[in-house]
Image (cartoon, rainbow, N blue to C red):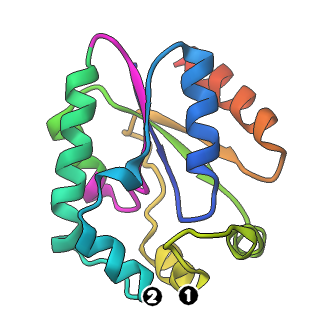
Amino acid sequence: MVVVVMGVAGTGKTTIGPLVAEALGVPYAEGDDFHPAANIAKMSAGTPLDDADRAPWLDAIGAWARDRAGEGGVVSCSALKRAYRDRLRAAAPGLVFLHLTGDRALIADRMAARKGHFMTTRLLDSQFATLEPLEADEAGIAVDVAPEAAVIAERAVAALRRL
């Protein structure tokens, strides 16, 4: 299976993704690495991306996921809107989404504690405003991010194996 670890900034996609990939025995790809430089500059300046900004990023992630079909993989991608997830699924049918969810205050605290990341807490409200949780017809699971990373990953892997 190819898993997209999704959620707003600060939920731990970059921490949980590699743990899930290791447990599943598949490669991990960091979604931020697929952003063009212009996107990084925009977010670093505290400006939210628009759908036009996200299109090439989503297409690159979709291509990576398509290339992993039949072999498996885990990639992080906020995938906040249903339309974004639909675009990813169009590129790579059969994707499964792992939605990392949590309390806004907890996530803001975690974001404030990280060093050297381009995504600032100024963008968190726009992330939550944009978020469209997984719908019943979307393959995926939601896991709360309140516990420590190892527990989150363990719960995620167990739920993914039940799909």
Q: Is residue 68 left or right of residue 108?
A: left
Q: Is residue 55 left or right of residue 74?
A: left
Please name the residue that numbered disc 2 is placed on: 46
Front in this rendered view, residue 45 or 156: 45
Q: Residue at x 39, y 49 (%)?
A: 31
Type of the residue with mark 1: Arg
- SS for callout 1: helix
Task: Tell me which corner region of the image, top left, top right, bottom left or bottom right, holds residue 91.
Answer: top left
Type of the residue with mark 2: Gly
Q: Residue at x 29, y 25 (%)?
A: 94
> Looking at the picture, how far across and down is residue 128, in whole percent?
53, 74
> Looking at the picture, how far across and down is residue 161, in whole percent?
58, 15
Label 2, residues with CA under 10 Å away: few <14, some 14-19, many ≥20? some
Q: Which residues are magenta?
A: 70-84
Of the 4 image quadrants, the one containing the N terminus is top left
- SS for callout 2: loop
Please name the residue that numbered disc 1 is placed on: 122
> Looking at the picture, how far across and down is residue 65, in whole percent?
27, 31
Front in this rendered view, residue 141 or 16: 16
Q: Residue at x 21, y 31 (%)?
A: 92
Q: Is residue 136 left or right of residue 117?
A: left
Task: Tell me which corner region of the image, top left, top right, bottom left or bottom right, holds residue 162.
Answer: top right
Q: Is residue 62 left or right of residue 110?
A: left
Magenta stretch: includes residue 81? yes
Magenta stretch: includes residue 150? no
Q: Is residue 147 above or below residue 162?
A: below
> Looking at the picture, how far across and down is residue 90, in whole percent?
15, 39
Dot 2 and dot 1 residues touching (CB under 8 Å) = yes
Front in this rendered view, residue 149 or 87: 149
